[in-house]
């Protein structure tokens, strides 16, 4: 795993010292809130509904055990004993007190973490496939490139004041688990006809108020051209992007207003100018970084204990069937630890749970942990013979829920339980849907289904790309939930379609149930997933289920 | 002319971020029902200015709609109602910090 260089270390420490001083000056009144606000946001500190919130970056979702333990310790010492993993592979602490924040940042720096560039109009945490370096379908581990981008974008003087925030996602697999097509820049690794590795570069994706799927600006970018090309995109955006209107400032709007052809031409032109300025230092750096991401020494051992457990223990089998993914080493598995126990808050882990996951990673997982944008935690490298022990240890702390990829594995943003921008709650909606389908014992029968919930139009909960998306709104002073269907965040990305009028808070769970019952009725076989059935049959049967045949709301 | 909707002045505490309300006797209370219910627009603006001047204590003061209830002012919008309690997914925030009050 990548270790901070002396330069990284000194930079982060100097920022902690600087911010500590700024906090003191705010507390003694030398700084006004107007002066302090941009300074705290540069350090990931927000003021939410009930308290401050500190957002800490987890670069490309990768953590080592000592870092996870430090997060657990921070949660326990300065917060309420838990942390919230977000859709951008960050962790948020919901209750820090302002005078404690310098100490928290200093504790984070001790384990090479920080909260820099988790807010503001800069390049945010670069996100990556959470199965990176482990997935069987992967061409190459994308994290060295993500780390290269992280170093390049951290404190980059030209890109600290972009027209708006800027998000980059990267995957090394043809099967996109990183929602690359909904990012400002999405990078998907592929091979060209000659077998060389490169990137499909997509630009202008984004959710929020104006959801857009990114368009392919370069079909094959040789890996050596990555930095100059990304810099060319940023540079064109920095010049063209609108600073007059916050709602039109994201690159997706720039692309839309400038036209794909013209913006592609400008990017290529800028790239031609930039390319010679990259004299190879980036490639030397990349090869150092690559060494830090070398694959672990995989263990060679029999896997029959796994097979025996799988046969004998139905609880283990159910978990193995849903929560394991195929590792590139056939003796290994990728474990997704569900942070979505039915009725719990999606993405929230207690300090105790974080410590158990850290211990398991150390003992059985080559000291590697990942946070997924789907708000789960991954042990990417577990030898199959260790899976029964891992499962048993997880079960002790409520982390063995067998629901990954199912209806209760819901993405939910913090919504109006925490977020100052929210227009409605999202967490309790997720909790109630999960509990309802547990009670119905339907979720394994329903099969793969992604529900994603946002508490406002900003779409942090990715509702536009949920197979079922739920958007919480404030309609005349009451919470109202709008449903979209058929969204998809994979390589076949699509934006969900609105079903029609929204539903009140106490109507939304029954409405979701009607959608699911309609799906079960129309599917051609148990193998036809919700998304496939939707793509085949269209929205009509679901509308009928939601609103009745005549379009009126059906109370049944 | 439309009637003025009564207001309270609310903000967040600078040090801990907790929701606070301006009282008629110039204190900051953690409780909505202790807030001063302001029924006059000009007075509301004055009270907001008074709040904004206390920049070493409070962050982001604003006027929130409220109504008179049996025990003092009550919020009228659900967002403000949540702010008087805390989150709905855990017993955290005011709903437990002041459960005994
Ligand atoms: S989608 Fe809205 S409510 Fe949810 S976290 Fe983002 S800004 Fe807050």
Image: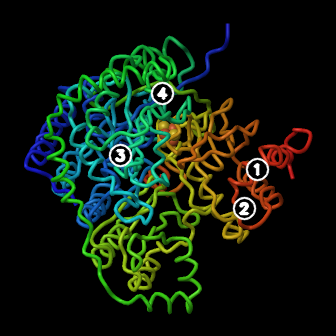
Question: Alpha carbon of mark 1 to alpha carbon of mark 3: how far?
Answer: 34 Å
Q: Chain of mark 4?
A: A
* Quarter of image, res A478: top right
Q: Residues within 10 Å of mark 4 (few under 14, many from 20)?
A: many
Mark 4 secondary-structure assignment: helix
| Residue furthest top in the image | B1
A388 over A496 or under it: above or below: below
* Quarter of image, res A10: top left
Is label 1 or label 4 in front? 1
Residue A425 appearing in the image: no
Mark 3 secondary-structure assignment: strand
Q: Chain of mark 2?
A: A
Mark 2 secondary-structure assignment: loop
| Residue furthest right in the image | A550
The first of marks 4 and 2 along the sequence is: 4
* Residue name at image x 52 percent, y 77 percent: A320
Q: Residues within 10 Å of mark 1 (few under 14, many from 20)?
A: few
Q: Which residue is mark 3?
A: A198
Q: Are the residues flagged by discs 4 and 2 from a single subunit?
A: yes
Q: Which mark is residue A536?
A: 1
Q: Which mark is residue A528?
A: 2
The first of marks 1 and 3 along the sequence is: 3
Q: Are the residues flagged by discs 1 and 4 from a single subunit?
A: yes
* Residue name at image x 31 percent, y 72 percent: A361
Question: Alpha carbon of mark 1 to alpha carbon of mark 2: how far?
Answer: 10 Å
């Amino acid at each position: 795993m990548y270790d901070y260089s002396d330069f990284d270390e000194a930079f982060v420490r100097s920022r902690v010292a600087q911010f500590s001083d700024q906090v003191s000056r705010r507390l003694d009144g030398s700084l006004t809130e107007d002066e302090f606000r941009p300074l705290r946001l540069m350090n990931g500190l927000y003021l939410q509904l009930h308290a401050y919130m500190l957002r800490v970056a987890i670069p490309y979702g990768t953590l080592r055990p000592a870092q996870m333990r430090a997060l657990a310790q921070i949660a326990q010492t300065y917060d309420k004993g838990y942390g919230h993993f977000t859709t951008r592979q960050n962790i948020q602490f919901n209750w820090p007190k302002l005078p404690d924040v310098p100490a928290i940042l200093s504790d984070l720096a001790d384990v090479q973490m920080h909260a820099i560039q988790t807010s503001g109009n800069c390049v945010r945490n670069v996100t990556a496939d959470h199965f990176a370096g482990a997935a069987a379908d992967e061409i190459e581990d994308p994290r060295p490139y993500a780390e290269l981008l992280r170093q390049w974008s951290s404190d980059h003087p030209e890109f600290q004041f972009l027209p708006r925030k800027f998000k980059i996602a990267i995957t090394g697999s043809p099967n996109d688990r990183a929602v690359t097509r909904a990012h400002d820049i999405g990078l998907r690794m592929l091979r060209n006809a000659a077998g060389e590795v490169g990137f499909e570069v997509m630009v202008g994706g984004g959710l929020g108020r104006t959801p857009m799927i990114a368009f392919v600006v370069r079909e094959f970018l040789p890996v050596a051209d990555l930095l100059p090309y990304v810099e060319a995109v940023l540079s064109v955006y920095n010049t063209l992007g609108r600073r007059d209107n916050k709602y039109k400032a994201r690159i997706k709007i720039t692309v839309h207003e400038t036209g794909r052809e013209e913006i592609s031409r400008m990017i290529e032109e800028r790239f031609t100018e930039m390319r010679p300025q990259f004299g190879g230092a980036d490639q030397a750096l990349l090869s150092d970084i690559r060494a830090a991401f070398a694959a672990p020494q995989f263990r060679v051992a029999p896997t029959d204990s796994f097979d025996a457990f799988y046969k004998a223990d139905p609880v283990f089998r159910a978990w193995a069937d849903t929560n394991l993914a195929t590792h590139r080493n056939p003796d290994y598995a990728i474990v997704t630890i569900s942070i979505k126990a039915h009725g719990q808050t999606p993405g929230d882990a207690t300090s105790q749970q974080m410590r158990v996951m850290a211990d398991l990673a150390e003992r059985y997982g080559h000291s590697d942990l990942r946070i997924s944008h789907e708000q789960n935690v991954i042990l990417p490298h577990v030898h199959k013979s260790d899976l029964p022990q891992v499962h048993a240890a997880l079960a002790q702390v409520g982390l063995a829920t067998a629901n990954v990829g199912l209806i209760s594995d819901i993405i939910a943003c913090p919504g109006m339980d925490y977020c100052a921008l929210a227009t409605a709650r999202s967490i309790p909606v997720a909790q109630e849907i999960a509990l309802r389908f547990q009670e119905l014992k339907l979720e394994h029968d329903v099969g793969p289904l992604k529900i994603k919930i946002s508490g406002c139009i900003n779409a942090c909960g990715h509702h536009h790309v949920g197979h079922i998306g739920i958007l919480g709104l404030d309609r005349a002073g009451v919470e109202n939930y709008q449903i979209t269907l058929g969204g998809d965040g994979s390589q076949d990305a699509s934006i969900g379609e609105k079903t029609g009028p929204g539903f009140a808070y106490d109507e939304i769970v029954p409405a979701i149930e009607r959608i699911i019952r309609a799906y079960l009725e129309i599917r051609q076989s148990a193998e036809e997933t919700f998304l496939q059935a939707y793509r085949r049959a269209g929205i009509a049967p679901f509308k009928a289920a939601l609103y009745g045949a005549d379009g009126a709301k059906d109370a049944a | 002319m439309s009637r003025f909707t009564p207001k309270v002045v609310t903000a967040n505490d600078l040090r801990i971020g907790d929701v606070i309300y301006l009282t008629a006797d110039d204190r900051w209370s953690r409780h909505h029902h202790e807030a001063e219910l302001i029924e006059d627009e000009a007075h509301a603006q004055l009270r907001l200015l008074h709040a904004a001047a206390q920049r070493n204590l409070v962050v982001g003061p604003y006027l929130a709609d409220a109504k008179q209830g049996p025990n003092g002012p009550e919020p009228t919008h659900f967002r403000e109602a949540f702010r008087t309690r805390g989150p709905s997914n855990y017993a955290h925030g005011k709903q437990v910090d002041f459960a005994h009050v």
